[in-house]
Each structure stands twice: as C-alpha cells, then as structure tokens.
Image (cartoon, rainbow, N blue to C red):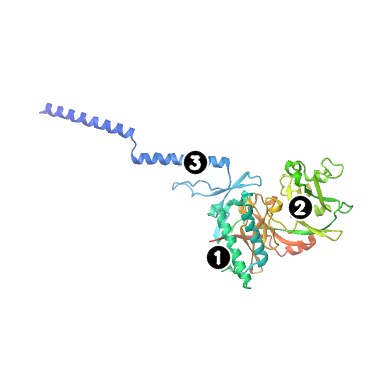
Amino acid sequence: MRILFNHKLQITAGICTLLLVNFANQYLKEPTYHQALIQSQKMTTASTFNANLAATSLAPVNRQQPAINFTQNNPAPTTFYSVIDEWKKYRYSVDVKQVLSPSQLPNAKINFKQTDLLTVLINTRQYFQEHAEDDPDTQRRGILGSQGVTVADILKTLDFMINVLEEDISNKRVTRLQDADFINKNFRVIKWTANHPDKPQQKRLRLTKYAAFTHPGSHKKTATYNTPLYALKDENKGDKFYTKYTKQDVLSGIYEPGGKEFGKVEPIAYLTRQGLEEALMQGTVLVNFTDGTKAFFNVDKNNGMSYVPGLKATQQKRYWYFKQVDAIKGYGYKIDAKISIKPGVTFAGDVLNVGLGRIIVIESNKGRRKQLQMGIIADTGGAFLPNLHQLDFLAGVFQSQQDFQQYIRQLPEYTNAYILVKK
C-alpha cells in the first residue's frame, strides 16, 4: 500500500508540475488585462512626455506644462507659463498661481469717461475683426490661457461692454460698468499680482504714465529745429536697409544731403533734439509748425534693435521712423492698421504675454477712499516685451513736461490690478 501510494503521489505531483509550467508560460506570453492596461498607460505617459518635450523645444510659449500625478510624499503640482520677448524667444517661466488669482472688485465707483472708453473698445474690437489673419499675435491667449481664458472670451467681453455702454449712453444714464457690484456679478475678476524677475518682493503693478506732447517744429531744417523725424518711403521698405543703422547713425546725417543713404527716407518734420527724444519715447507727437499748421505723427517701423531698460534715452540704439496720422495711435502690426486710442482709458502693456484687448481695473487709495479706474490694453512698447509687472497709462496731450508732471502727481506709482473677463 505504501509503495502504491507513493507511486500515485508521484503521478499526481507530475501532473501538477506540468499544469503549473503551462500556466506560467501562458502568463508570461499573454499579459493579463491589468498588465496590458499598465503597459498602455506607461506608453501613453511616455508618448505624452515626449510630445510635450518636443513642444517645449519647438514652441516654448503660450502653453501649460503637462499635469503630473504626484505621490503623497511629493509637493502639489504647479502650473507654469513660459514668458517670451518681442522676438518670440523664451525668456523665463512663472508660476501662474503667483501671478493670477480669483478675486472681487472692492465696493467703489469705477472711474472712466464713457464715450472715450466706448471708442477705444470699438476700435480694438474692429482690429481683431479686420486683422486677425494678418496679425497672429492677436490670437495669443498668453498667461490668461492658464485660467481657461480664450481669445473668444476676450471678444465676448468686448462685445458685452460695448453693448452695455451703447445702451446706457443712449438712455443718458451712468453706465452699469461703473458699478462694482455689476462687474462682480457679470465678470470673472482676476487679480494680477506683479511678477518682476529682478524684484521678487514687488507685488503691486508699477503704473507709469505716457502722453502725446505738442512740440514746435518746422517743415524745413533750421538752426533751432535741426533734428529730423523721418518716414520710410513705401518703395524702399522692402529691402530693410534701415535695420543696419542705430539712432546715432541716423542723427549723424546719413540721410541728409551728402550722406550715404540720402534719398531713401523722407524728412516729415524737424524738431529740437529734446522733441525727438520725447517723440521716440511716447510714440506720438503733435507738431505745431512754424507756418501755423499742425499734425500728429506716430511711430511706424523701428530699426529692429532692442530697447534697453535703464539706458539713457540719448544712448539707446533703437530708432523709430514716423508717419503722419489723424489721431493718437496705439497697437497695430502696421501703421495703417493701428488702433486709435484715447487718454484716460488706454493702457500700454505686454500684448504678447498678457494680451491685446484685456480689460484692466486699477485700484489705489486717496486718503481712506479706494479709487478704481478702468481701461483697456490697446497699446504696447519695447519696455513691455516682456513685462508682467507694469502698465503704462495714457494720461493725455500736454504742452510741456511740466504740465505732464503736475498732472500725473495725482496718479499712483504702484497699484493693485484686476483683469475682467465676461462670465
């Protein structure tokens, strides 16, 4: 019996061994459903990572970093935005949560001139409509894209505000857009905290001010008015010859009779040197000519050399060529397309990283009372590309720097800022 039992036991053990080997082979050759799912997830994650890596290399702007699933031992995920400069090159990244956050406007009247804001809103909306294909920068979501804000949301915001203003003005009543409660109910209010790479302690936006100045000038060069404003001739714009010359080259006389580039540009006005520097800085100048005529001139094209923050105006290499216009002009991809803007409701800002047509409310204190002011980003400049810590407020048209300085003393140097997006 013992021998027979051992024999049966051996047979049974052999059969079990064969079954186990076969099961193991099947398991190794054919992954289970869970293994296949895990493998698929690994492949998808790797593919997504590689795709994002490629996107980072090719287009490091206007995107969110891929979401990462952290374990309990790792810190919470953050969303970063890649900031670009005016040449569309990556400069640095910012943690969006430290720049933008949900908020509400404080309970105070919002100041602006209704008809002027309506004009600039309409002009900016028209720019989107007419030049979206010619100017792809209008389609940038910028840092607001991290908040789910699209260009369509910006256009909806402009349309809504235009409709409200037109209705309120036609009914001869104070517009609802000046009521903070109305804004809080109908708009997403996004607080904009300043981000300055060199001044991390700065939390409020710096509010600089600019203006159009009236300057005396002459149609012809004189002993007093000896510094030219030049316009590029249409037939010569294509060869980009003007990108070779600094401001200092231009002022040395290369375009004047006897200069090596004489005849390639047209002098459209002569100012003092101070008048030229102010025109270059402000972008627009109203010239009162000695013959009694007057005209607005606005920057058209520059020589492609970067503006250097902190460098004296007379030492800057950037030079702008001007063109006669019919009003103060703001942003535009070419001179004939630029947005006509109004003082008191226009901000110059970073149109690449913040965006054109963004509605801004700034907050300051006057004594114990809060002051709110509304405007729109409809202008830009070299100092704002990139710049997530500053706005430039169009203050008006002034006869002199003294008048300008006296006016802007009543405006804050730093301000809380909010961006409005229609819900």
When the figure is inspected, residue 58 is found, relative to residue 326, above or below; the finding is above
Between 201 and 344, the one lying in front of the other is 344
Tell me: residue 4, above or below residue 230.
Answer: above
Q: Which residue is mark 3?
A: 49
Q: Residues within 10 Å of mark 3 (few under 14, many from 20)?
A: few
In the rendered structure, which amino acid carries the disc numbered 2? Lys
SS assignment at label 1: helix
| Amino acid type indicated by mark 1 | Asn
Q: Is residue 297 left or right of residue 78?
A: right
The quarter of the picture where residue 377 lies is bottom right
Query: Which residue, given by chain and number where applicable, does mark 2 sit on?
Result: 323
Q: Which residue is mark 1?
A: 184
| Residue drawn at 41 percent across, 40 percent down | 40
Q: Is residue 317 visible?
A: no
Q: Between residue 219 and residue 304, name the one nearer to us.
A: 219
Q: Are marks 3 and 2 in contact (CB under 8 Å)?
A: no
How far apart are the alpha carbons under marks 2 and 1? Answer: 42 Å
Report the amino acid beneath label 3. Phe
Q: Which residue sits at x=77%, y=50%?
A: 313
| Label 3 vs label 2, nearer the camera | 2
Location of residue 250 in the rendering, given as x and y in whole percent from the top left corner: 80, 45
| Circle nearer the N terminus (3, 2) | 3
Secondary structure under the numbered disc 2 in the rendered image: strand
